């Protein structure tokens, strides 16, 4: 039998702080709080339900408070579960964040310590706060030992410590980054450092210190030094090569002047001499060789400059082909010119360089052809109102070139076939220089060939043109140039042999010459006599040709005399030689040696400044083949020159005057080349090399005197009686 539950059996919920589930269950306020409060409340609720079940209660009679209590218990349970889930999630997130932070710290640690460059952190007082492993290795100390030290306290070298501290204060004051170079010494080796310092701040923007580091650029500095040294050596070598070529050109041209002049004079006297013909061909070969080498040096050094001017292109092509007419006739070759160019046009081009290209191509065509035809063809196609595309073609029926060797023929010092080169000779520079010159003129060159079927060389370039003046105006100067009257010429050259040759050349052209070997005497003679023309050597001891030309122009201005023509006469191949002559007041430059044709052209005011030509030696044995009177005069001049040199060398050369030593060696070297005296040349070389070594200089001077005496004795024995 169930026992009914009365209202008095339930403890009423007392109002106040204990109001709630604990108050309803008879819990006071003191017992309600606590960590196990929810669990205790749940247990009390379950016990109450069991009591109600045993007491056979009518649920509908239960008060509303009970239902409130039940809902409250459910809410508490749900909130407890949600709270527990939230705590577990926060714990998981915190552990993940801690793991990520640890990974990030490990990465930063590896990143900083893996850097090969030292890194450091210093506070506002300049004390070391942190550094990486490279910094520790650089100073061979640990962070614990260096922490809190300034650069000076750290044991750095004074220069590096001063640089770091001064820059550190600049960064802290300006709050701007600094980048600078510094030097230090380590194990006796100087090290170059490229340093940087940047300020760093807290999250709130407060300046905390400086982050810095450096890169060791010692290897780069050493490499830069080696590169600068290598560049300087290369420039010195290039300058030395240019000086050598210019010097050798001068030394070769000085004796060559006598050789070419005498050969030409003798050829006119004996036109059928086979020996003279061979000698002239050898001289021409030397001209081509030395000229090519000098041109190659100018091209490679960038000193080759074009001088374009309006040119009658048809006449230039015709004259270029006519130069090879005699050589072609000797080999039984036919020459053809096919150049239907528009009339009454002058094309702007450098005639000297275009002629040089054509001469190289035509010379190769004639050289390597045993039969058939050598043709020069030219075509023009207008590309604008005053511009045209010029296409020139040189074709031959010679031996040809294999297809696989076409590319190499444009390389310097290379030829298509060694056997052919040995048979025909040549330096292998011609086509290379042609290509460089054509490219310098803005054109292109192409070679087509097959073995046994000859070669076809084509070049193209764009040219500007303008209408030519009328034939009347064009022909009048030509007729005037041909009517050259006999001239009274003053010739000045310190080397009397060259002066004698020039005197003979002028005489063969119908002119009268007076020869002097001193600039001061020449100036006095010019003031006393009425000369039509002055030809002076540019490089002479005492008053040289430049000073003489200036003095003559000054004398003409002061006396009111009409200006006379002055022609410079030099063996120098320097590109600025012509400009130096013009600045000195000369009208033209002749580069030794000079042929009769070029001399006549200069005297008649026609033709450009003479192009450089090369040299060869002059053997005393060749003198017997010339006219006896001329041989006597030449040997007499040689005797007098040798006696003068021996008189100069009677006084010992001063070792502290290298300029006088070089001048003496230079003067005697030119004489040695002229007479083909190898012993004298070796003595001059030894004198140059002796330099300021006084004992060696004395021995070399004695050997030089002995060689001069031997040559003088031989010259006297060869002199006709």
Image (cartoon, grey):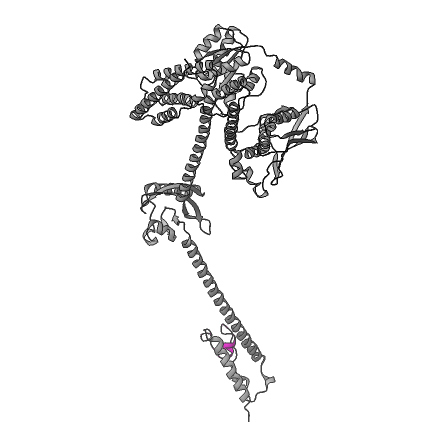
* Residue in the image at 44% along x and 13% along y: 519
Decide: is 721 above or below 687: above
Is residue 556 in view?
yes
Counting from the top left corner in percent of width and height, residue 515 is at 47, 12
Which is more toward the observer, 440 or 336? 336
674 drawn magenta: no
Position of 129 with respect to 8 (left or right) is left
Which is more toward the observer, 418 or 341? 418
19 drawn magenta: yes
Dominant SS of magenta comes to loop
Q: Which residues are magenta?
A: 12-31
Query: Residue 317 sits in which quadrant?
Result: top right
Position of 305 with respect to 466 (left or right) is left
For the C terminus, give its image quadrant: top left
Q: Residue furthest left?
A: 695
Counting from the top left corner in percent of width and height, residue 26 is at 49, 79
For the N terminus, give its image quadrant: bottom right
Counting from the top left corner in percent of width and height, residue 573 is at 49, 25
Decide: is 31 above or below 569: below
Which is more toward the observer, 221 or 152? 221
Query: Residue 622 sits in which quadrant?
Result: top left
């Amino acid at each position: 039998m169930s026992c009914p539950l009365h209202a008095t059996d339930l403890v009423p919920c007392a109002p106040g702080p204990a109001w709630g589930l604990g108050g309803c269950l008879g819990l006071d306020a003191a017992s309600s709080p606590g960590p196990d409060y929810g669990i205790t409340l749940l247990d009390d609720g379950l016990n109450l339900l069991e009591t109600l079940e045993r007491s056979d209660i009518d649920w509908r009679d239960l008060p509303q408070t009970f239902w409130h209590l039940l809902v409250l218990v459910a809410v508490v349970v749900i909130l407890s579960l949600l709270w527990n889930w939230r705590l577990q999630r926060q714990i998981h997130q915190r552990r993940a964040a801690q793991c990520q932070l640890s990974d990030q710290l490990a990465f930063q640690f590896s990143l900083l310590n893996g850097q090969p460059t030292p890194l450091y952190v210093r506070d506002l007082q300049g004390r070391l706060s942190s550094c990486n492993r490279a910094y520790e290795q650089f100073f061979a100390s640990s962070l614990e030992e260096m922490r809190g030290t300034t650069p000076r306290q750290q044991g750095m070298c004074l220069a590096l410590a001063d640089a770091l501290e001064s820059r550190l204060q600049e960064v802290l004051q300006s709050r701007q980054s600094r980048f600078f170079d510094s030097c230090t010494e380590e194990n006796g080796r100087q090290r170059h450092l490229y340093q940087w310092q940047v300020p760093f701040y807290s999250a709130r923007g407060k300046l905390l210190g400086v982050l810095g580091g450096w890169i060791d650029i010692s290897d780069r500095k050493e490499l830069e030094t080696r590169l600068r040294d290598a560049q300087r050596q290369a420039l010195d070598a290039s300058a030395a090569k240019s000086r050598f070529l210019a010097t050798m050109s001068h030394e070769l041209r000085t004796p060559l002047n006598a050789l070419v002049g005498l050969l030409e004079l003798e050829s006119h006297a004996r036109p059928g001499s086979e020996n003279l013909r061979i000698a002239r061909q050898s001289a021409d070969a030397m001209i081509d060789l030395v000229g090519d080498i000098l041109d190659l040096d100018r091209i490679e050094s960038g000193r080759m400059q074009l001088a374009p001017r309006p040119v009658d292109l048809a006449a230039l092509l015709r004259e270029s082909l006519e130069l090879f007419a005699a050589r072609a006739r000797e080999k039984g070759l036919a020459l053809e010119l096919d150049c239907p160019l528009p009339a009454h046009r002058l094309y702007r081009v450098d005639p000297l360089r275009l002629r040089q290209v054509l001469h190289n191509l035509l010379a190769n065509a004639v050289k390597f052809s045993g039969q058939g035809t050598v043709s020069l063809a030219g075509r023009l196609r207008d590309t604008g109102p005053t511009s045209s595309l010029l296409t020139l073609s040189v074709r031959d029926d010679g031996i040809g070139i294999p297809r696989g060797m076409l590319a190499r023929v444009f390389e310097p010092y290379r030829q298509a076939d060694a056997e052919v080169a040995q048979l025909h000779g040549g330096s292998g520079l011609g086509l290379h220089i042609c290509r460089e010159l054509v490219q310098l003129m803005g054109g292109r060159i192409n070679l087509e060939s097959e073995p046994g079927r000859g070669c076809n060389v084509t070049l193209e370039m764009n040219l500007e043109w303008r209408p030519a003046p009328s034939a009347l105006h064009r022909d009048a100067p030509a007729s005037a140039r041909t009517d050259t009257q006999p001239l009274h010429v003053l010739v000045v050259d310190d080397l009397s042999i060259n002066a004698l040759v020039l005197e003979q050349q002028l005489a063969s052209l119908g002119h009268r010459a007076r020869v002097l070997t001193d600039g001061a005497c020449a100036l006095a003679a010019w003031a006393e006599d009425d000369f039509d023309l002055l030809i002076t050597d540019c490089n002479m001891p005492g008053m040289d040709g430049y000073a003489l030309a200036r003095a003559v122009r000054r004398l003409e201005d002061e006396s009111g005399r009409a200006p006379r023509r002055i022609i410079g006469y030099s063996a120098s191949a320097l590109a600025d030689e012509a400009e130096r002559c013009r600045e000195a007041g000369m009208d033209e430059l002749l580069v030794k040696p000079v042929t009769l044709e070029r001399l006549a052209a200069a005297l008649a005011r026609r033709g450009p400044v003479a192009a450089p030509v090369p040299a060869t030696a002059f053997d005393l044995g060749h003198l017997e083949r010339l006219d006896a009177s001329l041989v006597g005069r030449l040997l007499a001049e040689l005797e007098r020159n040798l006696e003068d040199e021996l008189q100069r060398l009677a006084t010992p050369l001063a070792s502290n005057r290298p300029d006088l030593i070089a001048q003496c060696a230079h003067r005697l070297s030119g004489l040695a080349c002229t007479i083909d005296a190898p012993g004298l040349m070796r003595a001059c070389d030894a004198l140059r090399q002796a330099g300021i070594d006084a004992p060696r200089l004395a021995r070399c001077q004695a050997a030089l005197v002995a060689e001069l005496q031997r040559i003088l004795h031989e010259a006297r024995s060869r002199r006709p009686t």
